[in-house]
Image (cartoon, grey):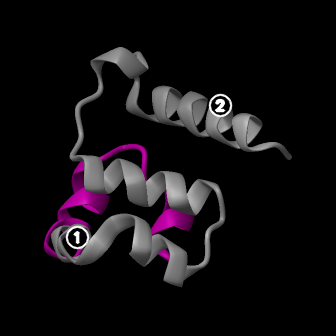
Amino acid sequence: MTIATKLRKFRKKFERESGTDVSQIEVPLSHVLDDVCRTLELPTSQRRQVLGRRGIAALGRTKARRFLSNPFFTQSSQSE
């Protein structure tokens, strides 16, 4: 699957599960980068490079809240 196809599927899934158009969704960039890295199936080491120390820390602080408040995150995402 091409990168463009993976990203298109990611966008469509996000729109479907959030119930809104992609232009109306506002989330922290660290969350978007993390989700894109996972969509592209980057290894953890590369995902950490993309996010940086502060991005990883921000994700750690908000992870539980993300799963509870964001309809995009499905049961399978929570088990990662």
Q: Secondary structure at mark 1?
A: helix
Residue 35 sits above or below residue 78 on the image:
above
Going 73% across and 44% down the picture, which residue do you hit?
3
Q: Which residue is mark 2?
A: 8
The prevailing secondary structure element of the residues shown in magenta is helix
For label 2, count other residues whose C-alpha is less than 10 Å away and answer few (under 14), some (14-19) or many (20+).
few
In reply to whether residue 5 is colored magenta, the answer given is no
Q: Which residue is mark 1?
A: 64
Query: Image check: 65 left or right of 33?
Result: left
Q: Verify CB contact (< 8 Å) between mark 1 and mark 2.
A: no
Going 18% across and 77% down the picture, which residue do you hit?
57
Toward the viewer: 56 or 21? Answer: 56
Residue numbers of the magenta segment: 60-80
Instruction: State the image coordinates of residue 30 (x, y, percent, origin top left).
Output: 28, 56
Q: Which comes sooner in the sequence, label 1 or label 2?
A: 2
Instruction: State the image coordinates of residue 65 (x, y, percent, origin top left).
Output: 18, 62
Residue 37 sits above or below residue 27 on the image:
below
Q: How many marks?
A: 2
